[in-house]
Amino acid sequence: MAITSRQQEGFTMPELEYMAQCETVEIVPFYRMDRLELVTGAVGPFRPPRKSEVPLWLAVMLKRTNRCRIVVPGWLTYHHLRELCKKEELPDSLFTKLPVHYIEIAHILLTNAEDDLVEPQSIRRLLQDLREVRQSKTRRGFEMLNSTQLQMDNLAAVEINEIRPLFKHSFDMLRQLDDLALSTEAARNQQQQQQQMFLQDSQSQQISQLDDDQLFSEMDDPYSAGGGYIR
C-alpha cells in the first residue's frame, strides 16, 4: 500500500489514540454479561470477578458506564516505570522495549481510569521523565543517520511520528548530497580520462614530430650515412 504525503508528514495525537484503542487490556466486570460479537472477534462472556481481555475502546466504554474495573498493565506501574527510567539513563543504553502505543494507552487510562491506577500523579511524572530521556536519545541517534537507514530499535508510535518529518527531510538531503558526490566523482574521473588521453596524444605527436625532424636532418646532412652528395 502506497504511503500518502499526509502519512509522510505524520499523524495527529487523536489519530494515534484511535489506533491505540484496538490494543487489548484486561478488565474485571462488575456484572454478568453475555458474549459480544465484534468485528475483530468475540469477547466474553463476562463473569465477575473473572478477568476478561477486551479492546481498549470497549474497556473505556464499560468503565464510563461503571460496568468494570480496568486492570492496569504491568508496565504502567510506578515501580516498573521507575526502573525503566533508570535503564534509559544508563550511558550507551538502547531503547527499552515497550508497547508500540504505550504513550497513547497511558494517556487514555490516566484520563478515563485514573482511579484504577496506584499513585497516578507519580506515574504521570515518571512517564514525562521517560519521554524526555527517550527524546534525548532519539536526538543523539540522528548522529548515526546515513543515506541508507536510521537504526533505532524499540521506538513507540508517537516517537516515530515525532521524528518522521525531520527524518524524511534529513534523509532526502543526504541522498541528494550522495548523488551530488557521485556525479562529481564521475565528472572528475571523466576529466582525468580526457586529460590522460590528451597527454597520450600529445606525446604521440611529439614522438612523431621528433622522428620526422630526425629524418629530415639526416637527409639534409651531407656527411650522414644516407645523405650527402653523389660523387
Image (tube, rainbow, N blue to C red):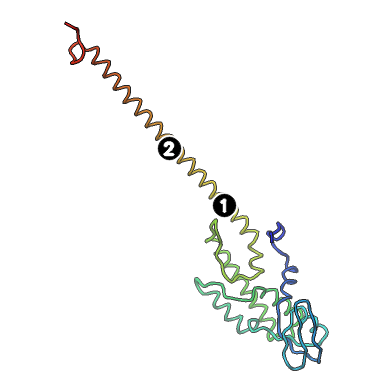
Q: Residue at x 60, y 53 (%)?
A: 172
Q: Is residue 216 above or below residue 201?
A: above
Which one is nearer the viewer's eye here, 174 or 58?
58
Q: Secondary structure at mark 2?
A: helix
Label 1 close to label 2 by CB (< 8 Å): no
Residue 189: image x %, image y %? 45, 41
Q: Residue at x 20, y 10 (%)?
A: 228
Gap between marks 1 and 2 measured at Cα = 27 Å
Alpha-carbon neighbours of circle 1 within 10 Å: few (<14), some, or many (≥20)?
A: some
Image quadrant in which the C terminus is located:
top left
Q: Amino acid at mark 1?
A: Arg
Label disc, if present, on residue 110 of the rendered structure: none
Image quadrant in which the N terminus is located:
bottom right
Q: Residue furthest bottom?
A: 49
Q: Residue furthest left?
A: 231
Q: Amino acid at mark 2?
A: Gln
Q: Secondary structure at mark 1?
A: helix
The residue at which mark 1 appears reads as 175
Which one is nearer the viewer's eye here, 229 or 141?
229
Query: Toward which corner of the image does residue 46 lie, by quadrant?
Result: bottom right
Q: Residue at x 64, y 68 (%)?
A: 159
N-term-proximal mark, 1 vs 2: 1
Query: Toward which corner of the image does residue 147 lie, by quadrant?
Result: bottom right
Query: Toward which corner of the image does residue 77 lie, by quadrant?
Result: bottom right
Residue 208: image x %, image y %? 32, 24
The residue at which mark 2 appears reads as 193
Q: Is residue 88 above or below residue 209?
A: below
* Left or right for 31, reference 191: right
